[in-house]
Amino acid sequence: MVKKLSAIIIVALCVSSFSVKEKPQKSILDIPGYHTLKCDFHIHTVFSDGKVWPDVRVAEAIAEGLDAIAITDHLKYGKLGKYPEIQEENRNRSYEIASEAAAKSDLIVIRGAEITQGMPPGHINAIFLSDANIAQADYMDTFEKAKQQGAFIFWNHPHWKSPDKDWEQDGIPQWFDVHTKLVENKTLMGVEVVNARSYSKEAHQWCIDKNLTMVANSDIHTPIALEYDLKEEHRPTTLVFAKARTQAGIKEALINHRTALWFENNIIGDAQFLDRLFHESVKVEKTEYLENLAVVTIRNESGLDFILENIGEYSFYNKTNFLEIEAGKEMILLVKIGSVKDQFNLKVSVKNLLTAPDTYLTTNLTCNKTGVIKDKKQVK
């Protein structure tokens, strides 16, 4: 049985690594003052109910271009891993294997655990642990042990449809008194707004109203390439705006709510960070005039596509009010200004940058006059 399991793991590693490397992770630019780190803080291995060995998780993350992962195997009081071959009493073992595998890379591996002792309060992740052997009979005692170690603690998938008939949710999360207590005593610091392929607008609003940190994670159990077509898509990712590319830098950013969530082709987060990310990515390269028509060249320097709606006073000659600026490409807009101006603003709503549920980033693209076009043939 051991040999069979090892063979499955090796095959999974080969398949997963090959699939990921066919197309590297899209680039997301740093913003002024911070490193933009791509992180997944909810990952499982065979040391709980995952399907792969910890070093496979490392190989997948490196191939995808992630900056940090947290190993968060289920922490069930009195229970060991799912597989009888795994008889480690030490609940740190999955982290130790992953950390050793990542030692010669730039990947940051964070020690964590998923506390799964019923509803409420639900499944809770504790990361930045110094020792994952924290399971106690009472989940509040488990939380206290994690808190004593200075862990960052967040609520996983509150919108998950629980198999427990007493807490059936059907995708609509419920906030209980115990969660209020955990926030008030500074135990609960964040909420997983995006889990795998699901997004909770209710949890998103909780984070805004209760000043909690938003996270997005894969909660991956199988090989990553079996869940995502990595040639065309990516795992959900927490973007951490960190002062330093270290565990301490990531933890400080999480505590101070400097995150955004990369989910499908959307970025979800606070307007101040999304605005900076957008303006680092999308640049007005030049604004020339063909008589009274402004010819504006815009370039998207990032690996993200942006979907814009023109909500300003000027209309376009060559486009509708909806635009998609593809990653790494230029777009020429012919703007009906009506006169030559040294400077004007294009006011846009960025339809894949969400600052709150159903609310999109509104910002300006400033266009400064750079020249005059005399030959109409120059404008395609």
Image: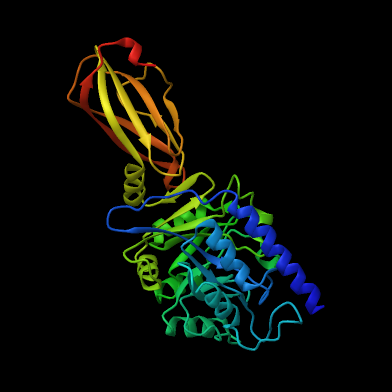
**Pick the front one: 357 or 13:** 13
The image shows residue 200, relative to residue 332, as above or below, that is: below
- Residue appearing at x 36%, y 19% in the figure: 316
Res. 170 in view: no
The image shows residue 100, relative to residue 359, as above or below, that is: below
Q: In screen coordinates, is 84 left or right of 351?
A: right
- Residue appearing at x 54%, y 83% in the figure: 132
Residue 203: % across, % down: 50, 57
The image shows residue 39, relative to residue 101, as above or below, that is: above
Q: In screen coordinates, is 276 left or right of 28?
A: left
The image quadrant where one finds the N terminus is bottom right
Q: Residue furthest bottom?
A: 89
Residue 334: % across, % down: 34, 19
- Residue appearing at x 44%, y 77% in the figure: 151
- Residue appearing at x 67%, y 75% in the figure: 48
Residue 167: % across, % down: 65, 65
The image quadrant where one finds the C terminus is top left
Residue 44: % across, % down: 62, 69
Q: Residue furthest left?
A: 342
Res. 306 in view: yes
Question: How many numbered discs sit on the rendered protein?
Answer: 0
**Pick the front one: 15 or 364:** 15
How is the protein colored in the picture?
rainbow
**Pick the front one: 100 or 160:** 100
- The quadrant in which residue 330 appears is top left
